[in-house]
Amino acid sequence: MINVLQRKFVFTAMIAVSILLFILLGTLNVVNIVMVRTETDKTLAMISEADGNFDRIQPLPSSAPPSDFRIEPKDKRDKFLSSNFFIVRLNENGQVVFTDVSRTSLVDEVGAEELALEVLDEGTSAGKVGKYRYQISNSRIGNETTIVFLDTSEEILSYVRVLFLSGAIGIVCWILMLFMVVFLSRKAIRPIAENIERQKQFVTNAGHEIKTPLAIILANTEAMELYNGKNKWIKNIREQTVRLNGLMKNLLLLAKMDEGTAEIIKTEISFSELVAESTQAFAEPFNLRNITLQVEIQPDIVVKANKDQLLQLISILLDNALKYTNDSGTIIVSLQKSDKRIKLLIKNSCEKLPDTPPDKLFDRFCRDDKARTQKTGGYGIGLSVARAITEANNGSITAEYENPNFVSFTVSL
């Protein structure tokens, strides 16, 4: 139990850590992209406004040169000089009249003119082509148009550098947090695990202690019946003693399964024969209530499981269907194999669908009968036992409501 709780604790904690790291590092990368792109756009606008001419950029007024130890942002002139760009100027007829590729070594005049004509055809005033961001503006010379292409390789490398660095840091932090959570989880869940273990041990011990008085009560009841004859009081005592004895057996079985102490010996068994025999055993009770039984069992289905537990599982589901099926109703039993999974379906009609959600039917002592009457004769934990048996044999069980007024249980092994 402690190991199960520890795994769940670690899994939940690491999901929270993963989400937090994803948000934190994702925000860091988005902010970096936005800030770098903003600076790039400012540089591009500054070069375009100056028409690519360094002499048209006015230096920032400064009363004194900055100290060597002060970190100051680059002024416009420094940004201009450190930028790689090229300029293409076209006349009003769309013909190239000037090309300046002196600020880059990766593009010649022919390549620059081809890029200029390409972006001019797109009809946008600004955008991106390859690794270049461009801006189209009216030139200060006549009616000419100037297109400035700014190389953004460094900006792209900045994005990638921050992305990989933050990703590496995130992975390292995630692994460190995993070790810390694993180390601390056992201490964190120990009080809860010990409390659960004490509760289960109490149920086990109490069940064993109650079994002896129940056996004595039942023996005395039989003796009273032998000497005094049958009467309604003795009958009631016998029925309630048998009922309580059955309840304790189910509680002890659940406690053993929760503790993992129940011995499970799995063998190859014919599931088809097991379902057919169990269904046949309920044929007479079904007939007494005029219940229509529809059986569809695929032959030669073999499963590796505990035979006694599977018999109990089938009996619980058939008994549950018998109790809650309306008179002259219908019970459907189907066993099929598909995609390496074996599915047992037991579906019964009822007067009205339960108000309880389907997944809550497997809770212990859960009944749709709010008054907890005993008219159905059940204990309220049969389906809990069915789920425990299914999970112990590496399977799953689900409940579903179907119209008109059908409740179905599906066991998948």
Image (cartoon, rainbow, N blue to C red):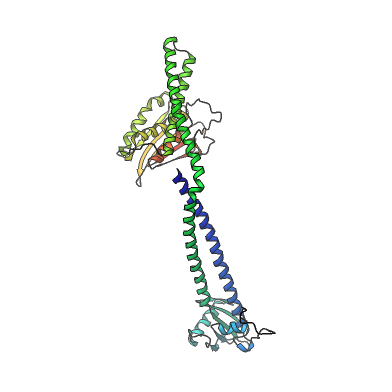
The quadrant holding residue 227 is top left
* Image position of 261 (left or right of 168): left
Can residue 43 be seen in this snapshot?
A: yes
Image position of 256 with respect to 107: above or below:
above
- Above/below status of 44 relative to 362: below
Place of residue 50 in the rendered image (x, y in percent of width and height, measured from the top left): 62, 85
- Residue 315: name its quadrant: top left
* Percent of width and height locating residue 167: 49, 65
Q: Which part of the image, by quadrant, shows the N terminus? A: top left
The residue positioned farthest toward the top in the image shown: 228
One can see residue 325 in this view: no
Q: Total number of numbered labels?
A: 0
Q: Residue at x 49, y 42 (%)?
A: 193
In the depicted view, which residue is nearer to us: 267 or 326?
Answer: 267
Above or below residue 32? Residue 379 is above
Q: Residue at x 54, y 28 (%)?
A: 372
- Quadrant where the C terminus sits is top left
Quick one: 160 or 140, which is closer to the camera? 160
Residue positioned 34% across, 33% down in the render: 276
Nearer the observer, 396 or 139 = 396
Q: Position of residue 356 (x, y in %)?
A: 53, 36
Percent x, y for residue 253? Answer: 42, 33
Task: Identify the residue at horizontal 45%, vertical 27% (top origin).
Answer: 209
